[in-house]
Image: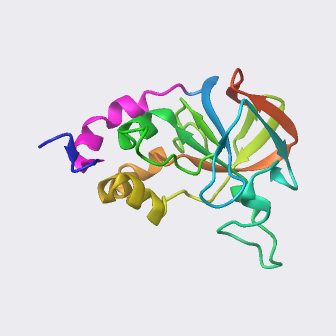
Amino acid sequence: MTQHDDQHSTLDFLQSKRNWALQAPKNNAPILTLCVRPNEGERQFVKSIQFDPIEGIIGDRWIRKTWMYLPNGKPDPRIQVCILGSRVLQLVRRESEEMIYPGDNIIADMDFSEENLPIGQKLQIGTAIIEVSDVFNTACSKWAERYGNDALKWINLPDNKPHRLRGILAQIIQAGKATLQDTIKKV
């Protein structure tokens, strides 16, 4: 079987690289990318981001337009921050210049598994504190469109779900600032 089917990684290829993806650091994870999404489809790659428990990531569209709302109509704070593992991104986004960047605020080389980061685990990113949400990131139709149906299937295979290959969603607990020089630390 080939590594890629058309433009996308195949399920066999992704599964063959799973162990490498799972060997990411469990703590003190380096941050590779910080991204603010001012509007749908827009990405601003920045050197630092500001976290606010009410506003979310300052300048990010979460406060104005998101995919989950509370019964009172306000954005669900459990999805204020999206973080994706860099190893998974490398496997699915094989033509990085031609393929659209996902909508994650942070790309970091970290193990986001339920075992390493259970629901409620607090993480320090720079001076901010976030909390791992109970909302599971199953990936959306945009993920399949950008990276292929096999990438979507791979994220959601029963044996892969506990590893949270699509990353985590988190709520901001303490305001602060993070830069590309910071790491993600369990607290």
Image position of 73 with respect to 165: above or below: below
131 with respect to 92 (left or right):
right
Residue 59 shown in magenta: no
Image position of 34 with respect to 36: above or below: above
Q: Give me the residue at 86% from left, 51% from top.
A: 53
Q: Position of residue 51 (x, y in %)?
A: 82, 43
Q: Give me the residue at 43% from left, 27% from top.
A: 23
| Magenta highlight range | 8-25
53 with respect to 139 (left or right):
right
Q: Position of residue 19 (x, y in %)?
A: 34, 32
Report the quarter where the C terminus lies: top right
Answer with the quarter of the image where residue 184 lies.
top right
Q: Give me the residue at 68% from left, 51% from top.
A: 37
Q: Nearer the viewer, residue 20 or 179?
A: 179
Query: How many numbered tags mark residues here?
Result: 0
40 with respect to 163 (left or right):
right
Residue with the most extreme left position: 1
Q: Position of residue 85 (x, y in %)?
A: 51, 37
Magenta-drawn stretch, dominant element (helix, strand or loop):
helix
Q: Nearer the viewer, residue 43 or 80?
A: 43
Color style of the picture = rainbow
Q: Position of residue 71 (x, y in %)?
A: 78, 79
Q: Give me the residue at 69% from left, 28% from top.
A: 185
Report the quarter where the N terminus lies: top left
Residue with the most extreme front position: 98
Image position of 110 with respect to 113: above or below: above
